Image (cartoon, helix red, strand yellow):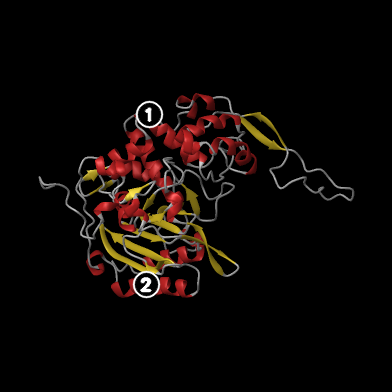
């Protein structure tokens, strides 16, 4: 790094887009190296299929636009913006457009926990109550049998709320590993979600401390009994553990220990004015048309930083994180995790045979893991891992090929995501 300051990426990053904490953090070198596809074993002609796929998806009215990125061996070989970031203004999508990546924030929280595990401050088998004492004696919800109507079928429910239930004591405490693998039962279904909403609604006032009140909400099932996605609570609890174990606020920890060292300069939970101007609009598809689901104006004045979601960033910035994982925990001389820890993260702790998991796909520490490519119907290598976001974002890393794929859109289209994976993998020639 030169005495005068940080060396910026070859692919331009807007200096005005720095988050408040990152702007104040020590100056770290940024190395978003680029390479011609053929120099990293990729076919440029075949990568053209990614462009064509996005064009078809836009033309079909499934998405407004997207940014796609492919990297190999720590170098970005393909980065393209297509379509528009906002249908109303027709602003073209840009390579540095910002996206709400939603649950793609979860692997970031998982890495933060693993960093602390490496330091001996957190163990995967630790009971969560070691850090959040209120979790010591949790209850588990048991749904009452449906009442039968006069002719035998279940009687009509009095409301659309959760089923009637009673509680029993948890057979064991939930652990850090349970949270990482979505096997805790914490806010993982209709009963727990309804009971936990009052605490969840306090998050903008109390930050991550909201999860400490969840002891009053029953678990959806006995810890470890099955896999069920905890959309927010489980990984917010992990982020709270990061705060307690490190002695830092969650975002401060990420900025100092992860985002800064990796050169992830264009990442935030609550964007400044410059970042909001580059923020793609979120849409839902209803009755064959796009309906605005969220917009940049809704981003003002909030200060909650969650582990389950909430990060906003660009494709290139998130690629720094993903390339670190693909490269065994190190990027450009900066080591975040050991190779063994990354291997652990991408191990199938939860097999595809466990209730709740799809065929050929296990679950690791904050990531899905391809365990059987044939059963999953994918070109991805077995051992590839990654995750997606509800608004249409997706990434994976392939440690065997040292390959990263990132797709950022703001309208969900699941078939599109798997087609993107296959198009990238078909571009491998070496």
Q: Which image quadrant is residue 167 in?
A: top right
Q: Looking at the image, which residue is at 33% across and 37% down?
A: 252
User: Residue 177, can we see it?
Assistant: no
Distance, label 2 to label 1, CA atoms, is: 44 Å
Disc nearer the start of the sequence (2/1): 2
Say which residue appears at 78% left-offset and 43% top-offset: 146
Which labelled disc corresponds to residue 415?
none
When the figure is inspected, residue 323 is found, relative to residue 222, above or below; the finding is: below
Q: Which picture quadrant has residue 199? A: top right
**Secondary-structure class at tag 1:** helix
The residue that label 2 is drawn on is 51
Q: Identify the element where label 2 is drawn.
A: helix
Left/right of residue 219 with respect to residue 346 in the rendered view = right
Residue on which the image places disc 1: 245
Q: Nearer the viewer, residue 250 or 272?
A: 272
Residue 211 position within the rendered picture, expressed as x and y whole percent measured from the top left: 51, 33
Nearest to the observer: residue 85 or residue 255? 85
Q: Does the image show residue 160?
A: yes
Q: Mark 1, residues whose alpha carbon is within 10 Å: few (<14), some, or many (≥20)?
A: some
Which quarter of the rendered picture does the C terminus lie within? bottom left
Q: Where 326 sits versus 349, above or below?
A: below
């Amino acid at each position: 790094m030169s005495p005068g300051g940080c060396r910026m990426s070859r692919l331009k990053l807007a200096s005005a887009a720095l988050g408040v904490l990152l702007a104040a953090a020590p100056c770290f070198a940024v190395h978003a190296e680029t390479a011609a596809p053929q120099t990293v074993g990729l076919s440029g002609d075949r990568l053209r299929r990614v462009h064509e796929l996005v064009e078809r998806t836009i033309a079909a009215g499934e998405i407004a636009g997207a940014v796609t990125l492919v990297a190999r061996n720590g170098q970005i070989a393909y980065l393209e913006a297509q379509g528009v970031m906002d249908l109303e203004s027709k602003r073209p999508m840009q390579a540095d457009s910002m996206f709400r990546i939603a649950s793609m924030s979860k692997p970031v929280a998982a890495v933060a926990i693993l960093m602390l595990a490496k330091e001996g401050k957190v163990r995967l088998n630790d009971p969560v109550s070691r850090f959040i004492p209120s979790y010591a004696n949790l209850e588990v919800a048991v749904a009452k049998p449906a009442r039968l109507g006069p002719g035998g079928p279940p009687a009509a429910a009095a409301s659309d709320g959760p089923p009637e239930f009673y509680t029993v004591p948890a057979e064991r405490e939930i652990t850090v590993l349970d949270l990482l693998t979505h096997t805790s039962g914490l806010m993982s279904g209709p009963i727990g979600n309804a009971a936990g909403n009052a605490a969840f609604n306090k998050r903008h006032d109390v930050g991550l401390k909201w999860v400490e009140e969840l002891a009053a909400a029953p678990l959806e099932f006995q810890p470890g009994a099955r896999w069920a996605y905890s959309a927010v609570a489980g990984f917010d609890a992990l982020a709270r553990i990061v705060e307690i174990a490190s002695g830092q606020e969650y975002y401060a920890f990420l900025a100092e220990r992860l985002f800064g060292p990796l050169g992830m300069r264009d990442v935030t939970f609550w964007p400044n004015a410059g970042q909001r101007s580059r923020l793609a609009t979120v849409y839902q598809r209803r009755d064959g048309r796009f309906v605005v689901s969220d917009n940049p104006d809704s981003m003002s004045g909030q200060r909650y930083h969650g582990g389950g979601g909430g990060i906003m960033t660009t494709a290139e910035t998130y690629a720094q994180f993903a390339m670190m994982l693909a490269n065994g925990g190190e990027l450009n001389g900066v080591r975040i995790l050991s190779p063994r820890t990354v291997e652990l993260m991408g191990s199938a702790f939860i097999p595809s045979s466990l209730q709740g998991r799809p065929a050929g796909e296990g679950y690791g520490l904050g990531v899905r893991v391809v365990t059987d490519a044939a059963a999953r119907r994918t070109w991805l290598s077995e051992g590839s891992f990654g995750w997606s976001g509800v608004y249409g974002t997706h990434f994976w890393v392939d440690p065997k090929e040292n390959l990263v794929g990132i797709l950022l859109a703001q309208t969900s289209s699941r078939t599109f995501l798997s087609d993107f994976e296959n198009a990238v993998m078909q571009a491998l020639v070496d």
